Amino acid sequence: MQHESKYLTAGIPGTGGVIKETPEDFVVEEIPAYLPSGQGEHCYAVIEKRGIATLEALRRISRALGVQERDMGYAGMKDAQGLTRQTISIPRVSPDAVRALQIPGVAVLSAAMHGNKLRLGHLKGNRFTVRVRSVAGNAPALAEETLEIVRRRGLPNRFGVQRYGVQGNTHLIGACMLRGDYRAAVDTVIGDPKAVADERWRLAIEAYHRGELAEALSLFPPHFRVERDLIDRLLKRPDAWQQAFNAVQPRMKRLYLSAFQSFLFDKVLDGRLDTLDRILPGDIAFKHENGACFIVQDAEVEQTRADSFEISPTGPMFGCTMMEPSGEQLELEQGVLEAHGVTRESFALPGALRMDGERRALRVPVSETVVQGEGENLVLSFALPRGSYATSLLREIMKVE
C-alpha cells in the first residue's frame, strides 16, 4: 500500500530542494475567522511558537497560568517543525497576565478578551512563507509556471504522507483494523526495522519480529508505551491479538482510522486529477463559501460555477453513512475501496470508533502567491483555506516526495 501519487503539473519540471532546515524556513500564520471583541471570559492570545507542536505549547501555557489544559481552545493544529503564529483561548485570565508570560519556545504577540472558547476550525485559513533551499537555477520561473496552472485549475487537496506518522504506516494500521486483522495491526504498530534510524529502537523491532518478546520488551525505551503495552499483553496471552491491540487508546485508534480515510481520499484524488476542475454527472459538489455539499443535477449548468471557483467536485472521507455520488465518480470510489479490501460498511465499527464519513473538496484555491529567488534558495508565500496542506503545493512545485 504505497503512497506514490501523481502531479497535476506533471509537464513542468520540479525545482528540487529541501524545506524545514530551520524553523524560520517554514512560517505559518493563521487567518482568523473573527477577532476578539474585548469583552467576555476567554482571553484570546496570538502566540508565536518555534519548534514545538500546538499541544506542547498549550501544556506549557497551562502550567504557567495554572489553567486546565482541557479548558483552553485553539482553531487549528500547527506543526512542530516551523515558526507558527496562531490564536488560542484561555479562560478566566487577564490579557496582562498572558502578555507577561515568559515561556521557552512560545512568545505572546497580543491578547484580548472574547465571549466564547476558540474551537477547532474557527479560522479562515493559513498564510505560509516557505524557504526552499538548494533549488535548480531556474527555480523561480518553474515555480511561476506551476502556480499559473494551480491558480487556474485549483490545488489538489491532498493529505500526503504527513498523515502517516513517524514510520509512515499509521494508515496501514487503520486498514488492518477495518479488515479485523489484529495480528497485522499489532505487527504494524511495532513497525518495520528498516523504517527507523535509532539503533535500540531498530533492535527492539527486530527482536519482536523474531518472536523474542521478552527481549523486545527490554529493548523498547520506557516512552514507547503503546509498543510496550502490546508486547506485555502478548507475553501474558500469546496469540490473543485483538485483546493485545486493545492496549491502544481509543484516541490513537481513531487516528489510525482517520489516516486510512486520508490515504483512500488521496487515491481517489489521483483518479480525478485530469478532471479536477470539471463537474461530472453524478458528482457531489462542494460550496467553497460555506462548505455545504449537494448532488449535481446538471453538470453543464454547474460547470460555470466551478469555472469561477464557487464550487468544486468532492472526494470521499469514507464512512458508513457518507453521501454517495453516482456515475463515473461512484465507480472510481468503489474501485478504490475494492482495491484495498474494505467496504463502506467496514467503517461501521462499534462505539466511538464508528466512522460516518463526509465529503471533501478535491481541489482548493491558492491565493496571495509571491515567488522570490534568493541565490540557491526559493522563497514562496501563499494562502490556503483551512484544512488544506502547504505540502500539497510544495510537492507540485518541487516534485520531491
Image (spheres, rainbow, N blue to C red):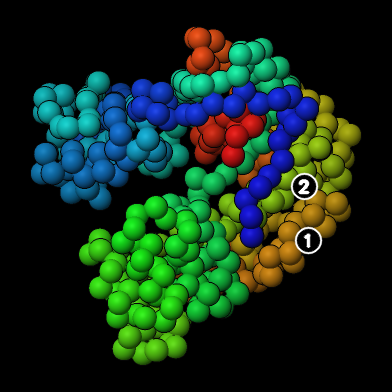
Picture layout, residue 231 above or below residue 27 = below
Residue 355 seen anywhere in this rendered image of the structure: no
Residue 354: image x %, image y %?
A: 52, 68
> Which disc number belongs to residue 315?
none
Q: Nearer the viewer, residue 84 or 322?
A: 84
Residue 215, quarter of picture = bottom left
Q: Quadrant of the C terminus?
A: top right
Residue behind mark 1: 335
User: How many labels, in total?
Assistant: 2
Name the residue type under label 1. Answer: Gly
Residue behind mark 2: 271
Q: Secondary structure at mark 2?
A: helix
Residue 122: image x %, image y %?
A: 43, 36
Q: Nearer the viewer, residue 161 or 388?
A: 161
Residue 165 seen anywhere in this rendered image of the structure: yes
Report whether 83 appears left or right of 263: left
Residue 274: image x %, image y %?
A: 81, 37
Residue 112: image x %, image y %?
A: 23, 24
Q: Residue at x 11, y 39 (%)?
A: 64
Name the residue type under label 2. Answer: Gly
Q: Nearer the viewer, residue 26 or 212?
A: 212
Q: Nearer the viewer, residue 382 or 353?
A: 382
Q: Secondary structure at mark 1?
A: helix
Q: Residues within 10 Å of mark 2 (few under 14, many from 20)?
A: some
Q: Residues within 10 Å of mark 1 (few under 14, many from 20)?
A: few
Report whether 41 appears left or right of 167: left
Contact between marks 2 and 1 (CB within 8 A): the answer is yes
